[in-house]
Image: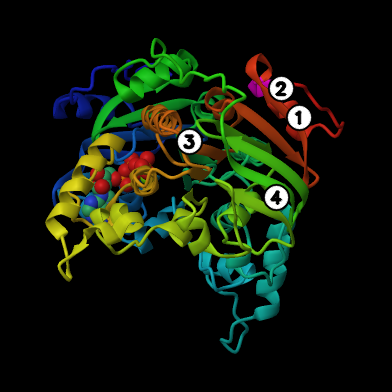
């Protein structure tokens, strides 16, 4: 353990000499993955500048940094799907390559296995086919694909990783958490025991609720104990503190520090990532809602999918959270309100008007806005510029004299990008060139700018870094203060407890508790979500 680089809280770049000095120290066999001097430039953005990274054998190593700091880019270069700039070097085990020459074939033979941030699954293929695509399709002696073996292989993995799906299920029919499990099983197949390769996970838990994320954490520890080296990217600081051995921090594409996890607590890690502490910043305050607040949303007797009859009222200026397990029907409630799902029964009123079943346009004209859970599928026009994406909710405003007012649209978008801290080279670049967290912020900007009567947020901070998270809830609170009613679903109970005025707990298709004020504590919420005892708190 001697010779660790001391924590480098200073964001300034280590000089090339320092980098090489450390490299010599670490050149023993104990370092499995070594990256030296990695740089990557995109038009308008220096995504990585002379970054070094070393992962030891059997270590879980966290790669941390704010949105757009270069984490996914580094991983894509390691996987050979993007090329680094000449001058950088990458070594995995005994195989090394110049950073500009890593190919998917090199990465594969060196044992690099990646679960990418967007999972990289094929929605129209089955679970078995998706898993088979991660290796090579099993073949018969005739050369034909051996479908039966493919299916048994998938069945084994489904059992081993406790995936709640059958081999035949199409990926698009699974929710995001189960899709994540499939992607992980695909990456890990054939490597249960210690292996020379490296497993890389880019924000695998963004869509996972606490229990599933916990199960994943436990299996990662198990793999590491068996000798598997893991590079782990997450914005969830508690996970990093719990399971990783060391942390490398990137800031704006530069190496900002390498730390022993044991030396860090949440505040120290936040400071390492942001370059400042959030400890002294006031949390978003709970606003005691006057009972005189006008009800904006009134739901009675809603039944849809797993939801078996719920009543709910959200008033002007109020932020209400729905807590519950994955699959408990939280998203179903939001989607029913937004007209994205047909409800079986129940009445939904927004600002007094009854919303017809399954009509998004009626919901939108009643002043409902929704940020859905699955950004890529539901909300973002991936090939279009950021400006167009941010303007999609109000596009009619820019249509005048029979033409689009592009300049005005771009100008407004640029100022919203500043408000929401969306980091991009310009409003004109396609949204799919933004980092994951920055795409999420752009989608939030799109819906919040409409001054909705009712704002529905489904996992709004997934993939958003610790600094921007607080920022987003400040913007949501501002919208509430201006009169919007907000209904939010998040699997992060800490976040829920910190930002909502009142939370309802959904279990078995019904609201089993409602809590507010001093009872609104993460631990209490968790008990209500997971415990099987009916429990109703008075507010
Ligand atoms: N294909 C691309 N074209 C142009 N710019 C890109 C492209 N891919 C990434 N970038 C830019 O490179 C920078 C780093 O992005 P990257 O996705 O690596 O960030 P990240 O650390 O993974 O962020 P997040 O936590 O939000 O996922 C960002 O400024 C991003 O906009
Ligand atoms: Mg990323």
The CA span between labels 2 and 4 is 20 Å
Q: Residue furthest right?
A: 533
From the image, which quarter does the N terminus lie in? top left
- N-terminal of the pair, mark 3 or mark 2, is 3
Q: Is residue 461 left or right of residue 300?
A: left
Residue 16: numbered disc: none
- The answer to whether the residues at label 2 and label 4 have Cβ atoms under 8 Å apart is no
Residue 40 pos. (x, y %)? 20, 47
The CA span between labels 3 and 2 is 39 Å
The CA span between labels 1 and 2 is 6 Å
Residue 485 pos. (x, y %)? 52, 37
Residue 518 pos. (x, y %)? 65, 14
Residue 57: numbered disc: 3
- N-terminal of the pair, mark 2 or mark 4, is 4
Q: Quadrant of residue 388?
A: bottom left
- In this figure, what is the number of numbered marks? 4
Frontmost of labels 3 and 1 is: 1
- The answer to whether the residues at label 1 and label 2 have Cβ atoms under 8 Å apart is yes
Residue 327: numbered disc: 4
Q: Nearer the viewer, residue 117 or 39?
A: 117
The CA span between labels 1 and 4 is 16 Å
Q: Quadrant of residue 153?
A: bottom right
The CA span between labels 4 and 3 is 37 Å
Magenta residue span:
520-524
């Amino acid at each position: 353990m001697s010779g660790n680089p001391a924590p480098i809280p200073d964001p300034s770049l280590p000089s090339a000499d320092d980098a090489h000095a450390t490299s010599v120290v670490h050149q023993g066999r104990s370092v499995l993955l070594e990256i030296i001097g990695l740089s990557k430039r995109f038009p308008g953005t220096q995504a990585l500048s002379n970054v070094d990274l070393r992962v030891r054998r059997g270590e879980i190593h966290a790669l941390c940094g704010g949105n757009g700091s270069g984490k996914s880019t580094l991983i894509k270069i390691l996987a050979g799907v993007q090329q680094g700039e000449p001058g950088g070097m990458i070594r995995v085990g005994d195989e090394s390559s110049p950073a500009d020459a890593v190919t998917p074939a090199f990465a594969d033979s060196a044992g690099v296995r990646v679960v990418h941030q967007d999972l990289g699954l094929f929605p129209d293929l089955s679970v078995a086919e998706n898993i088979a695509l991660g290796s090579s399709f099993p073949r018969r002696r005739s050369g034909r694909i051996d479908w039966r073996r493919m299916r048994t292989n998938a069945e084994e993995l489904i059992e081993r990783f406790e995936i709640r799906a059958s081999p035949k299920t199409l990926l698009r029919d699974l929710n995001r958490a189960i899709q994540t499990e499939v992607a992980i099983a695909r990456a890990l197949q054939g490597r249960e025991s210690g292996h020379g390769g490296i497993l890389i996970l880019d924000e695998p838990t963004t869509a996972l609720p606490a229990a599933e994320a916990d199960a994943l954490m436990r299996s990662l520890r198990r793999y590491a104990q068996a000798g598997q080296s893991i590079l782990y990217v997450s914005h969830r600081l508690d996970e990093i503190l719990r399971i990783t051995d060391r942390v490398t921090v990137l800031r704006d594409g530069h190496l900002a520090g390498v730390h022993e996890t044991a030396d860090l607590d949440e505040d120290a890690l936040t400071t390492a990532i942001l370059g400042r502490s959030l400890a002294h910043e006031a949390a978003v305050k709970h606003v005691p809602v006057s009972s005189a607040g006008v009800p904006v949303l009134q739901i009675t007797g809603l039944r849809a999918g797993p939801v078996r009859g719920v009543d709910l009222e959200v008033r002007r200026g109020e932020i209400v959270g729905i807590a519950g397990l994955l699959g408990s029907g939280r998203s179903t409630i939001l989607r029913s309100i937004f007209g994205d799902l047909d409800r079986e029964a129940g009445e939904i009123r927004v600002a007094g008007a009854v919303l017809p079943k399954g009509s998004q346009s009626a919901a939108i004209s009643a002043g409902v806005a929704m940020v859905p859970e699955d950004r890529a599928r539901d909300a973002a026009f991936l090939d279009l510029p950021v400006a167009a994406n941010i303007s999609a909710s109000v596009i009619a405003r820019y249509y005048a004299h029979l033409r689009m007012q592009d300049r005005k649209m771009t100008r407004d978008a640029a100022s919203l990008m500043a408000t929401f801290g969306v980091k991009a080279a310009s409003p004109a670049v396609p949204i799919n060139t933004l980092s994951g967290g920055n795409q999420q912020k752009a989608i939030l900007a799109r819906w919040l700018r409409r001054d909705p009567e009712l704002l529905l947020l489904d996992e709004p901070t997934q993939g958003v870094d610790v600094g921007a998270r607080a920022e987003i809830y400040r913007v949501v609170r501002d919208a509430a203060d201006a009169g919007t009613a907000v209904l939010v679903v998040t699997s992060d109970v800490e976040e829920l407890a910190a930002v909502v005025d009142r939370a309802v707990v959904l279990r078995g298709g019904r609201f089993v508790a409602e809590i507010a004020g001093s009872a609104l504590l993460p631990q209490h919420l968790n008990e209500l979500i997971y415990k099987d005892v009916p429990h109703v708190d008075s507010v």
